[in-house]
Image (cartoon, rainbow, N blue to C red):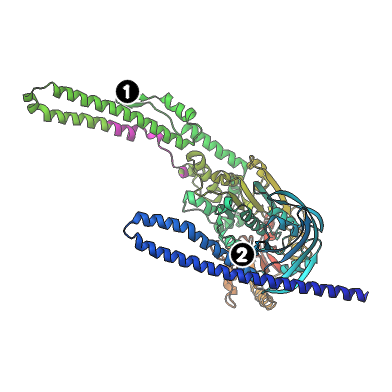
Amino acid sequence: MWKDDLKGEADREVQLNLEREKLRKVLNEINTCMIDSINLRKEVIDYILDLRKKNLEQYEDDEDKLIEYFDHEIYTKEEQFRLVNKSIKELTILKGSPYFGKVIFEDEYGREKIYIGRFGMSNREDCEPVIVDWRSPVCSLFYSGSLGQVSYKSPMGTIEADILGKRQFIIKKSNLIGMFDSNIDVKDEILQMVLSKNAGEKLKDIVMTIQKEQDALIRQPREGVVVVNGIAGSGKTTVALHRVAYLLYNYRKLLQGKVLILGPNSIFMDYISLVLPSLGEEEVTQLTFSEFTNDILHLPDIMDLREYMENILSGDEQFIHEIIYKNSLRYVADIDKLISSIEENCFVAEDVLFYDKIIVTKEEMEKMLKYYFKEMPLFKRSIRLKKVIYSRIKDERNLLVRYIQKKYRNKIENMTEEELNAHQTNLEYKKRNEIEEVIKEVVRIKRNKLKWLKEPDIVSVYSDFNKNRKLIQEDLAAILYLKMKLDGSRYKDKIKHIVIDEAQDYSPLQFRVIKELTGCNSFTVVGDVNQRIIPSDETPAMMNLDNIFSDLKVKNFSLGRSYRSTNEITNYANQYLKNGKVISLIRSGIEVVEEQISSLKKLVDKILEDMVKLKEKGYESIAVICKDLKDTETLSNLIKKTMYIKLINGEDMIYSSGEVILPSYFAKGLEFDAVIMIDTSYRCDENTLKYIVATRALHELHVYKISSIN
């Protein structure tokens, strides 16, 4: 037996040395490519500067020629500079850790061995791949299940392959620290190592530890709608971002600069902001829904997230009832009825008279509005009709003006020279007056007789419908919907793929507006119905997209395994779920601390004591999470008397590591090494918030119950 062990150790040492030699060669290749790229970048910069100088001198007196030249220069050289610069950034990242996986397989082309990294790199001499980008179709073999027969989709079609071996590497600062041969999924040792680390300042990429079910979602076809209902900590946001990187890699010409990510608030958007750049993708627009609508609406007085959530948490029944209504299908139906009413009653046609002559009849205009132009939005129909009327008025005006001119010309032609001398000036004056009267008639008609064709202000129309209540986020969707249907508004940029995160809180109308406003037919929609904060009586719209996006193919998936919290934290959080239990990854940790606190002073002492101990353990992000803003600010002021803690009390604040205190609704989507949850007077219907707060913790959760803080 011991001889077998020795043989195994010897084989492993041989393999380790071979892999170290391979790493050395790859690093040399990277260094050579880096030097070549830096030299090329310098050549491009020198070329641009030299050419710019020459042409400024050559064409300094010909501005048009100078502009034409610079356009050409930008097209040919600055794009080259951008690509070289991008390559240098990727090589810099690869230098520290060139690859993390290796697959040996056989397919119809023979036996292959590939090394998989964050970015791809080819040999300079024969252009053979040295490192294959993880987004390449063949790399799905690395993330697939056990060894043996599998298939992958390539540009040539589906290819059958036999996986003979998979190996994972831990490479840090250009050194091979360890390796694991894997025959199932990503090796537990590496996954456990990654999951046990502290939370950084931002969300990280997971290319090294993507699981089979996550990889399947990332590599879904671009067309249609991918809906992912994932539990807290299942990696749904990270999967969505990696899917963006995957799609851009495989469809760059189509998608470059045309991908939009919609997130719940600015804190969250800042939190995820570094994932895509770390994957080499930077030209992706990231907005909240309010920012998305602001490009068209420009409404200054919208209730922010803080006021919105505080109204819900305070138990404002009228406000909660309003939200439930505006997240319902009944609300969509009512907005559609409002549009139908406007279409029917907005423009009540009247005969258009030029003096006493009818030049456009009421019946004729009604036909134009309701039949001939019916494919156009209503307000565009009215503009088109107005052009027709103006054209008729112009024709009538020209007829009268020509008649007047002819009348006076005939008079003058029939006069003697004496009569001309006596009356010509007076005749010219009378002619001008008659023509001016015609012009005045034109102005009078346009100004006074066509008022019925004036389009109403859409915001005012909606405000009347909304009984002049303060506008909230759900109202933005309704106003946009009205604008789309009535004046044909469309989003300013071409969008070819949209990611919607925290989608469980989106209403049916929001989904409908996003699709119709952008004309986009490719979506990744991720959320967790267990984290639905907004009260509603209906199934979350994200789970009903088959009906809302009826013309698109919708695929629904679920992620039921948590990669964030320990078993202990996950099991504690499960008590707040209405349906089902979370399947946690097996990662044991410290038991959840749960304690009833009798006074505010004791609560503050406990928090201070905990934070000191948690920092001593090396935790880099510790959050005190309260129910609402009032509790948060009260505790923050008391804690700050002894130690510093950052208060997050607005959605435009930036999240960073360290000790923070924030209300429950700003914690959505974030994660911390340790969480101190302050459980005050949550109502029975607020278990969702408790679930969200509890599942923000990676390693430790302390729950302190107190009847009241204020």
Mark in the foreground, 1 or 2:
2
Say whether residue 446 is magenta.
yes
Report the disc number at residue 357: 1
State which quadrant residue 533 falls in. Answer: bottom right
Q: Quadrant of the N terminus?
A: bottom right
Residue range in magenta is: 441-459
Q: Quadrant of residue 350?
A: top left
Is 413 within the magenta?
no
Q: Which type of secondary structure does the marked residue at label 2 adopt?
A: helix
What quarter of the picture does the C terminus occupy?
bottom right
Instruction: Please give the count of numbered marks on the rendered protein.
Output: 2
Which residue occupies the extreme top position in the image?
414
Where disc 1 sits, the SS reads: strand
Residue 658, horizontal then vertical, whole percent: 61, 72
| Front one among 76 and 303 | 76
The residue lying toward the viewer, choosing from 95 and 590, is 95
Residue located farthest toward the right when viewing the structure as drawn: 1
Magenta residues, dominant SS class: helix
Look at label 2 and name its amino acid. Ser
First in sequence: mark 1 vs mark 2: 2
| Above or below: residue 136 compared with residue 23 | above
Find the distance from the CA under tag 1 to the CA under tag 2. Answer: 72 Å
Residue at left 74%, top 49%?
A: 158
Amino acid at pointer 1: Lys
The residue wearing badge 2 is 278
Question: Can the viewer see residue 710 in this picture?
Answer: no
Q: Position of residue 484 (x, y in %)?
A: 51, 42
Name the residue at 26% across, 26% down.
400
Lateral position of residue 100 relative to residue 50, left or right: right
Q: Quadrant of residue 626?
A: bottom right
- The residue lying toward the viewer, choosing from 112 and 170, is 112
Decide: marks 1, 2 in contact (CB < 8 A)?
A: no
